[in-house]
Image (cartoon, helix red, strand yellow):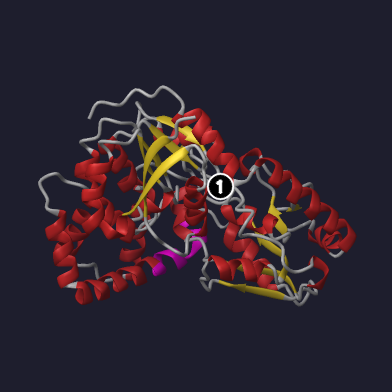
Amino acid sequence: MKKVKVVFLYCSDKFDSYSIDWKDAFQNAENIDGVFLDMYDYKKNVAALKNEITKADFIVALHSSNTNPSNIRVYMHFVSVLLTRKIPFITFVGNEYNIPFRGCRLSEKINLFKLLKPEILCTQLPQQSAKLLYGVELPNTRIAEYPHALNEKTFVCTTNYNSRKIDVGIKTGRYGNYLGDSDRNRIIDFFKENSYLLNLSTSIDAIKVDRAGWVNFLNTCKATIGNESGTNYTEPNDKTVIAIMDYVVNKLKIKKQPFWFNWFEHALYNYKPMLSYKLLMNIYDLFNTKLYFMRFAQYNLYAKVADYDFEEIFKTFFKNYANPISTRCISSRHFDAIGTKTAQLLFRGNYNGILRANEHYLSVNHDFSNINDVLQKFKDESYMNNMLDKTHQYIHDAHLYKHRVAHFCKNILNSDIKVNSL
């Protein structure tokens, strides 16, 4: 069977392990002839893209192309070439929730997609939520649900569950209070603050580790904790999260960044055909030290916004919020734990219809009222080993990255896609 020729755009970010997992799965797909262009190496790969799209059947931008400011900055160099395409363009989306940082905002990504007019947008979100979030802004783009999966070759069990020394462990950053959603922080704080009373040994922190470090850590833990990724309040224009940032800045009387810095940041993350991105990046490199300190000050500002009193933010901005869009979904972290046979103590949720409460994870009530029952099951090693084995087999049967890619090849790459007019 003839292979489909695909140009993949990605950024080589080692800390987003799911980005590496998706790239690996596509590289190993037997029916794809893939060319992989690292957008960080834009000085070489813009020309390579210009050459490759004349020979390819599809262009696919992976999650890592749009997850953070560094990635969005380099993305801008590729836009002019992508606008000349005569073949279908498919984009995956990373971090599908509202973040106040420039270069991470959902509105910036959507504006970029409005310009590029992808034929297909692959979302981590349940289909219904994604259509509410993207449908109005991208009416000619087909939305396809592609949740994360398990990389079964990397996330493996190397330590017997019964011999692991840590009862509950996790390495994750806190959710900013500007999201209007405190579930992630509440479950972290509960286990961290009550470990002694619950008679649990814990290792809970926000220290970043690479993929190998995360695998090793999970194999030291009997269980990890969490909830669905995403939030209950998401909007395509970031209006509320920007309003919250302005509110906190005024409340705390924080000095704002100069106008020129805001203009420069806006120019870096919002494509304009009349701007030279080579010149912008040369300026960025020339004043890198000064800009670094200004961005560092900006991140400190965001940290203050993220830690500002949750109850005040919720009462002011979310209590009477009309028609919220939920972006709650399953995370790659849930699959990572399953691969290493690490139990999961999670708030009850939908998890894209993949994980079922008390069958694949121990369901914790949002008010923690059933915690004694949860811990009784958790401390029954026979019960837990049975749950972990069945869940591990269930995911291996249907939810590996190779399954996602096989579905993608059958339903996307082999489908008749009409190219949107640019």
Picture quadrant of residue 114: top left
List the single residue furthest toward the front: 1
Residue name at image x 51 percent, y 68 percent: 210
Left or right of 382 on screen, residue 119: left
Determine whether the residue tagged by mark 1 lies in a helix, strand or loop.
Answer: loop
Residue name at image x 66 percent, y 72 percent: 192
Closer-to-camera residue (254/118): 118
Is residue 93 visible in the rendered structure shown here? Answer: yes
Closer-to-camera residue (381/405): 405
Query: Residue 40, position in %: x, y?
Result: 30, 59
Query: Residue 316, position in %: x, y?
Result: 44, 53
Query: Residue 283, position in %: x, y?
Result: 14, 66
In the image, residue 219 sits, relative to residue 322, either above or below, namely below
Residue name at image x 22 percent, y 37 percent: 83
Q: Which residues are magenta?
A: 303-313
Write down the residue under mark 1.
Answer: 148
**Looking at the magenta stretch, what is its main secondary structure?**
helix
In the image, residue 390 sits, relative to residue 373, either above or below, namely above
In the image, residue 224 sits, relative to residue 405, either above or below, namely below
Is residue 314 visible in the rendered structure shown here? Answer: no
Say few, some or many: other residues with alpha carbon within 10 Å of mark 1 (under 14 / 14 to 19 / 20 or more): many
Picture quadrant of residue 147: top right
Q: Amino acid at mark 1?
A: His
Query: Residue 262, position in %: x, y?
Result: 20, 60
Q: Is residue 45 magenta?
A: no
- Quarter the C terminus occupies: top left
Q: Is residue 304 magenta?
A: yes
